[in-house]
């Protein structure tokens, strides 16, 4: 068994562990160290990490880390192959030929089947596969050949790593090696002498070619084994990485005398490849993977949840090539709060200088405006960057170079963190009125929503639909840069927002037959409720966190100046997206933080739970459906909201929870959903009603339809019990205490189905 150095023994040396990187093949510039820091930690580690940089030795036009090394790199200008003697040149040609055959270059380029055990071609379309593979293999073979055959190159590259190891002194080292860097690390560590005194607490190799036979034949040493100075060795490989041909190298290298063996881990970094260009060999893509981060953090005694500047999913974007832009939210530091690495005294000094010089205002809105203005000067294309100041954030579309600049200058810019503006999607007879007792409440208490205003954040609304006569207060577009703009005329090509809004408020034309079954007198749950509609999803039903936060900012600002019935009492969010536990705590994403602020300011927040309750899985017996627990999305996982699942509209006690409705608990163990409401085959407004016969209404299903049932119910409640306006915690408690238990699991049904009559009679 490998020995593990305990925290106590490390502390006894009175020195923190050292972190050293060594990069792989390719033309790398010096900022690569900062990129690796951001991918692993979300912040620049400064002097706490170091890069054994050698790219300038092979590519002489690149600047090296110092004049001495740069001079050595420049000596390599010209074709080193031409200076080889005949025998060495023949060996080089044989090596490159064997390596090309081992990698099966032609098979990969042509997309044909595997050539040998464990060797699989990239399952990519030809347009993506060919340029990607050519770039990888051309660089890999060329740089690796230079390492093994260029005169003096092997020793010079190794010297770069030895210099960093000597600089670590007696401290235990965590060494992270990518691609060809793992070859260099193995050579150096296998011949560590008394002068070097290497103590490698953890060797982490990523995308390593150490399993390739032709590489093994060129390694220094007679036998393949774990170097004696290595206490732990973790090897990570992507199944689509053409350089890490052998994904498991542990069976090739014998344990050392300590008993240290290689722990192989195949990781499928799907998210990185789907976010931008295919790049399964990318170092940043590996380092941003949760399992790689956890391995490095553990060996350094780092808190994996420590504060960062760049979120993990944003750090992945630093591996992108070219000018591809990515939607991000730049959170601005509030006055009085320190940037990462600052002390309280430094903050006081900065703010004193601000007061004296007026460089950046002390108010948050001044800081946001300042960050937006400085970003406009930093970006290469202001129009493409789409810089959009919000209340606490600046939304922008930045490329990898611009993201790196923001990360490097976060203290000067007064940036707290850079988050990904993640994608949110819509979650797709008012016969359900009786199910939640809204019809009885209307007859007994006149609970119709009069005097209450509700916001609907969705795809917009078809404002001239007869159903919405006299209930729409305003419609704003939040999908374009700048302040929310009034939409005149207000349209909803997608139709989702109109369907959702129609469940909450409005009514059909009196006596007119409408809908697919020629119904009469259709109405929303609270027909007199006034609606303020925010278009935060595109005409295709997709939107960014930034657009939603812009609407939330506008609601907060509106309520700060509004009085009485003009204030917005609640909001409906029939939208959501996935939750990534490696980026933020459950219920603590940027959008959740802004919803929490609104809730605490007195606004009820109703969110659809999600439609991820069923997952299609391909098996040997064909495709089967499995029900998925812990499938509640973001922002429904927020505690300060009412998360709504779906039940059958006619027979909820018999049929129970809809199969598609997302289940709890949340990933941190809290009970969700809070309640369930009718969400199957709900009849509501058809945005494409013009020119159709009796089709001004249509059926739709989803938790998107369940959430507005609860929004309408709460609006009806507040229209009667006005003293509960601005008291969301008490309203939520009443709602849940008066629910009808459907006899289903708590993580499926929440507290059950709301009952407006019971709610009104309890107070």
Image (cartoon, grey):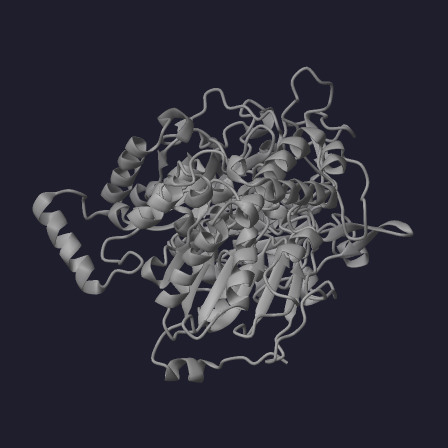
Kindly indicate the quadrant of the structure image that contains residue 424.
top right
Q: Position of residue 210 (x, y in %)?
A: 64, 57
Q: Position of residue 534 (x, y in %)?
A: 47, 35
654 relative position to 230: left or right: right
Query: Is 480 situated above or below 668?
Result: above
**Exactly how many numbered labels are in the figure?**
0
469 relative position to 700: left or right: left
Name the one closer to the observer, 574 or 685: 574
Q: Residue furthest right?
A: 621
Q: Position of residue 594 (x, y in %)?
A: 42, 50
Name the one closer to the observer, 69 or 680: 69
Kindly indicate the quadrant of the structure image that contains residue 91.
top right
Q: Position of residue 156 (x, y in %)?
A: 44, 53
Q: Residue furthest left?
A: 356
Q: Quarter holding the N terminus?
A: bottom right
Can residue 103 be seen from the camera position used here? yes
Can residue 754 be seen from the camera position used here? no
């Amino acid at each position: 068994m490998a020995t593990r150095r305990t925290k106590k023994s490390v502390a006894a040396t009175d020195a923190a562990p050292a972190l050293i990187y060594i990069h792989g093949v390719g033309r790398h510039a010096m900022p690569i160290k900062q990129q690796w820091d951001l991918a692993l930690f979300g912040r620049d580690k400064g002097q706490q990490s170091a890069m054994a940089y050698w790219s300038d030795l092979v590519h002489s036009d690149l600047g090296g880390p110092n004049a001495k090394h740069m001079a050595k790199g420049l000596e390599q200008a010209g074709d080193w192959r031409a200076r080889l003697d005949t025998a060495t040149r023949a060996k080089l040609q044989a090596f490159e030929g064997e390596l090309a055959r081992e990698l099966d270059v032609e098979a990969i380029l042509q997309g044909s089947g595997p050539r040998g055990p464990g060797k699989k071609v990239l399952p990519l379309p030809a347009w993506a596969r060919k340029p990607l593979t050519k770039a990888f293999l051309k660089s890999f073979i060329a740089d690796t050949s230079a390492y093994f055959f260029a005169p003096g190159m092997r020793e010079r590259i190794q010297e770069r790593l030895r210099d960093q190891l000597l600089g670590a002194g007696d401290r235990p080292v965590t060494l992270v090696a990518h691609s060809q860097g793992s070859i260099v690390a193995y050579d150096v560590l296998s011949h560590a002498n008394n002068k070097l005194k290497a103590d490698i607490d953890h060797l982490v190799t990523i995308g390593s070619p150490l399993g390739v036979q032709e590489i093994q034949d060129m390694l220094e040493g007679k036998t393949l084994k774990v170097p004696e100075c290595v206490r732990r060795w973790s090897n990570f490989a992507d199944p689509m990485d053409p350089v890490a041909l052998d994904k498991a190298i542990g069976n090739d290298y014998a344990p050392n005398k300590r008993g240290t063996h290689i722990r192989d881990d195949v990781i499928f970094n799907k998210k990185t490849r789907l976010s931008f260009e295919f790049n399964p060999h990318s170092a940043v893509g590996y380092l941003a993977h949760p399992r790689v981060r956890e391995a490095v953090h553990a060996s350094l005694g780092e808190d994996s949840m420590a504060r960062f500047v760049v979120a993990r999913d944003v750090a992945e974007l630093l591996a992108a090539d070219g000018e591809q832009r990515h939607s991000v939210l730049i959170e601005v530091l509030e006055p009085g709060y320190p940037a990462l690495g600052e002390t309280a005294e430094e903050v006081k000094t900065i703010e004193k200088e601000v007061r004296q010089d007026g460089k950046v205002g002390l108010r948050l809105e001044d800081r946001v405006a300042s960050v937006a203005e400085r970003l406009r000067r930093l970006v290469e294309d202001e129009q493409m960057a789409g810089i959009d100041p919000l209340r606490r954030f600046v939304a922008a579309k930045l490329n990898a170079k611009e993201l790196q600049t923001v990360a490097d200058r976060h203290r000067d810019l007064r940036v707290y963190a850079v988050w990904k503006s993640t994608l949110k999607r819509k979650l797709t007879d008012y016969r359900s009125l009786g199910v939640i007792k809204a019809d009885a409440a209307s007859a007994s208490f006149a609970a119709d929503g009069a005097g209450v205003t509700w916001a609907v954040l969705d795809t917009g609304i078809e404002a001239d639909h007869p159903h919405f006569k006299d209930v729409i207060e305003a419609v704003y577009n939040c999908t374009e840069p700048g302040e929310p703009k009034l939409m005149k005329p207000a349209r909803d090509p997608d139709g989702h927002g109109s369907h959702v809004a129609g469940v909450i408020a409005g009514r059909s034309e009196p006596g007119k037959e409408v809908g697919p079954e020629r119904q009469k007198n259709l109405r929303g749950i609270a027909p007199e409720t006034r609606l303020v509609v925010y278009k935060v999803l595109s005409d295709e039903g997709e939107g960014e966190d930034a657009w939603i936060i812009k609407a939330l900012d506008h609601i907060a600002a509106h309520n700060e100046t509004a009085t009485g019935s003009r204030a917005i009492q609640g909001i409906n969010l029939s939208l959501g997206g996935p939750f990534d536990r490696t980026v933020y705590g459950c219920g603590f994403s940027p959008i959740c933080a802004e919803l929490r602020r609104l809730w605490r300011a007195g606004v009820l927040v109703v969110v659809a739970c999600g439609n991820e309750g069923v997952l299609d899985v391909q098996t040997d017996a064909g495709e089967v459906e499995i029900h998925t627990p812990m499938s509640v999305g973001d922002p429904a996982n927020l505690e300060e909201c009412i998360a709504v699942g779906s039940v059958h509209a006619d027979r909820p006690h018999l049929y129970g929870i809809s199969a598609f409705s997302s289940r709890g608990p949340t990933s941190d163990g809290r009970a969700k959903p809070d309640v369930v409401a009718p969400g199957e085959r709900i009849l509501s407004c058809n945005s494409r009603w013009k020119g159709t016969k009796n089709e001004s209404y249509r059926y739709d299903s989803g938790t998107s339809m369940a959430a507005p049932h609860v929004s309408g119910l709460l609006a009806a409640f507040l229209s009667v019990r006005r003293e509960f306006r601005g008291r969301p915690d008490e309203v939520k408690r009443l709602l849940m205490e008066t629910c009808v238990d459907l006899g289903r699991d708590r993580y499926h049904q929440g507290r059950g189905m709301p009952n407006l009559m019971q709610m009104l009679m309890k107070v």
